[in-house]
Image: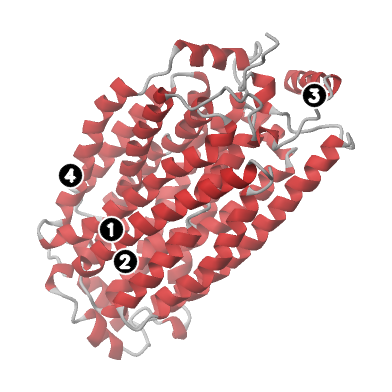
Amino acid sequence: MSKSSTDEGEDHEQLISEKRPPCCCDAYQSDDPEKRVSPFAVVILLVLFLIYVLNQADRLVLPVSIPAGLRCHASVASQCNNTNFSNSALEINLMNLPASNKSEDCIEFNDEQQGLLTGPAFTVIYVVAGLPLARLADTRSRSVVLILGLLFWSAMVLLTGFVKEFWQLVVLRVLLGVGEASCNPVAYSLVADFFPSNHRAFALSIYHYGVYLGGALGWMSGALNVILDWRWTFRILGIAGIVMAPITFIALWEPKTVRKRRLERRKGKKVYSIKEVVLFLLKCPPYWVLLIAGSIRNIPGYALGAWLPTFFSRQYGVEASHYAIPVGLVVLFGGGAGSFIGGFLSDRLSSRWANAKPFVIAAAQLLAAPCIMGVLLAPTPTMSYGFLFLAYLTAETWLGPAAAIVQDICMPAMRSQASAIYIGVITVVASLGPVLVPALTDHIPLFDPCTVGVGYALLVIVPLFYVTSSALFVVLGLVIHFWNKRIAAEEISYSVLDSDKLSGDDSDKSK
């Protein structure tokens, strides 16, 4: 038996001897009523939030810029003229696009290359880099790891404003994934350290509001094409990230008490290896069911992020400035409200029913499916924006509660690596989303990309995966319920340890 297994077994026996059965979700509630959120924790959360806003804006600005002038209009027309499909809608929707969408300073590529650029080119390296960076965050200064990552990805965004060829876009997109992989594992770990477990879902929902504010900035950047060349959009965002780095260095530091607690958690063990973390998590059914559910849920999100700007451009024949601002506002307020609602409901219901989080997510995804159908079938862009608000309000409740579940079921010394594995898996699977759209439009006549094929492809992909993920989150809730019962009855030899109590996450009054 490995040393890790021995240590965990001793912890297990200690819990049993104290008649406190370990439970993978015991950490949903803090047993220390005096533990409150400190002002310093709020500052930490604010800094992490601002960094995440830049993270998301830098990620989304590419797909928004593609129909706003980055991709040559001639390459779209050429692709359609070379197909056997009808070009009648091409004359209506593509050839009549406003001049601001037909930048002369553009790069040529087709739909399949666009799917590659907005999907796997980013996500594969994002995942590969995530694990070693997360291990560094578990063993070294988390703030340093995050600051270096911020500087690196901001430099890649800045350089994107100077590219001339498609391959240069791909290389910089890949390197962007390296830098951005440092963000979430570090942030999740810091939030778990500075917020007691019964406040984590809401704290992480606030952090994930950066998805929507950053997404709104990314969408609204399309409107800048009317005033500035698309290259300046990338340059401005890159400079903003570089300016943010010294601010982060000043504000984001860990008190000695936090560093001391991190050392005590290891119980004489320097660091858990990736192998030990994986073996630990493989013995936790709720974790890998969460991986499956989160992965399925992430696919439609990535598909929409990559192709919704193109959908509005081709479906309604409008320029980027027409849809950029209303969709940006929808993302900001609809998505943000959904994120807060998800975190608030999860924490509120978890105080009475520890297993509430997955069921809150499941209900919301089921409600989101008909809303997104309205977005894609609406006869006017204004109606589409209205349905999109409802879709974001419901669908985006999942990020904070799902991230909180990861933190709740993992030992603190493993949290960064466990978060990186979770983020990595759901991101790799989600990279299928942008690729699935051209897979349908390029090979099935019904989904002709030169007419309304992008909308039809999204109509098939997004609601289907919303409903499927809803069912899987219900399964996750049931798995957690029965897993806890088996642990309480001591019917299994191995359990996921009550990480907060073992590590001193909640203070032990007997000390």
SS for dot 1: helix
**Distance (Cα) linking label 3 and label 1:** 49 Å
Q: Are marks 2 and 1 in contact (CB under 8 Å)?
A: yes
Going 23% across and 41% down the picture, which residue do you hit?
Answer: 238
Viewer-side label of 3, 2: 3
Is 466 located above or below residue 47 in the figure? below
Q: What is the quadrant of the C terminus in the image?
A: top right
Which residue in the structure is indicated by mark 3? 12
Instruction: Tell me: 11 left or right of 329.
Output: right
Going 64% across and 36% down the picture, which residue do you hit?
Answer: 28
Viewer-side label of 2, 1: 1
Question: Badge 4 local density, few (<14 within 10 Å), some, or many (20+)?
Answer: some
Q: Amino acid at mark 2?
A: Pro
Residue 309, numbered label: 2
Residue 236, numbered label: 4
SS for dot 2: helix
Viewer-side label of 4, 1: 1
Residue that extends furthest to the left in the rendered view of this protein: 227
Is 511 located above or below residue 322 in the figure? above
Whichever of labels 4 and 3 marks the residue nearer the N terminus, that label is 3
Q: Are marks 3 and 2 in contact (CB under 8 Å)?
A: no
Is 511 located above or below residue 292 in the figure? above
Which residue in the structure is indicated by mark 1? 219
Looking at the picture, how far across and down is residue 443, in whole percent? 47, 78
Going 34% across and 27% down the picture, which residue do you hit?
Answer: 147
**Distance (Cα) linking label 2 and label 1:** 8 Å
SS for dot 4: helix
